[in-house]
Image (cartoon, rainbow, N blue to C red):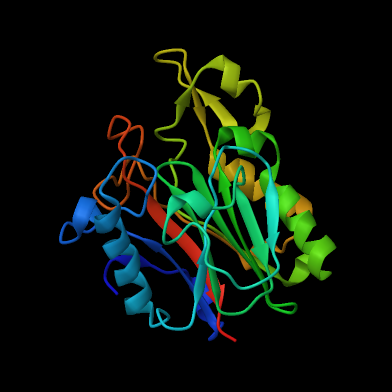
Amino acid sequence: MSNLLKYDKFKQFDRLIHGTTLKNDIFPYMFSFAFHTGEDVGDISKNRNHLMEKLGIDKDFDVVLANQTHSNNVVVIKERKTLGWKNHGDAISDCDALVTNQKNILIGVLTADCVPVLLFDKTKEAIAVVHAGWKGTKAQILSKTIAKMIDAFDSNTKDIYAIIAPCIGSCCYEVGSDVADNFNDSVKQNMQNGKFMLDLKKENYNQLINAGLEKENIEVSNKCTSCDSDSFFSYRKEQECSGRFLSFIGMRG
């Protein structure tokens, strides 16, 4: 489908369903997927239903989303059940990463500048999604998610593939010293205005490498959501926009 970004590292796995939605002006609210930002729930539901139909999984997949709070909380999904998809009220509370080995479940994160990460263990057939803003990144949520995959499913990091999906780039992510001081290796100072430019992609890539993933199993999107706000929602570029795009992963049984 034209309003969906897919990733090369995952395309080799036939049973894997994955992607990141893109803006599309023929759909309500530019194809936003967020229930929690004040848009008409019926229209957002139409966007969600359209995605499931186009993926061909509207009849046989459950979907699980979380109420994202910039935490480092990771939840393991142990059974098939739709949560946070048909209404926001039953989304998994206070959680920014989901892990499961259940088949026919789609899990996803909603973002508009923060870092979405998709993980897939090809041997244990476990999947995970991570929402990492600067707070979650500082709290090592990606490292913690991989540790959860190891604990819950006996994953070997050599078998895990990872996608760092589109997010705000170091070209545009200006932060103050209060944030920059948490990221020594991923900050450059902009000498023109004294502000700091934070590279969250690099920071999360380092967490993947430090966890033991192979470099050749990692794909980092070169897209910046702020630079390419025609395709992606950007909270900063669009002055606190309400739209969110969805990055998701699931596996057919």
**Residue plotted at (45% across, 46% down):** 167
Out of 123 and 172, give the one closest to the viewer: 123
Instruction: Classify residue 105 by image quadrant.
Output: bottom right
Out of 8 and 135, give the one closest to the viewer: 135
- The image position of residue 68, as x and y in percent, is 54, 44
Count of marks, rendered view: 0
- The image position of residue 18, as x and y in percent, is 48, 71
Determine whether, in the image, residue 159 is placed left or right of residue 239: right
**Residue plotted at (48% across, 83% down):** 60
**Residue plotted at (31% across, 61% down):** 45
Considering the image in quadrants, where does the N terminus appear? bottom left
Q: Is residue 35 above or below residue 181?
A: below
Q: Is residue 167 above or below residue 2?
A: above
Out of 25 and 41, give the one closest to the viewer: 41
Instruction: Classify residue 226 by image quadrant.
Output: top left
- The image position of residue 184, as x and y in percent, is 67, 27
Q: Is residue 80 above or below residue 64?
A: below
Q: Residue furthest left?
A: 26
- The image position of residue 48, as x and y in percent, is 34, 64
Q: Is residue 23 visible?
A: no
Q: Is residue 55 visible?
A: yes
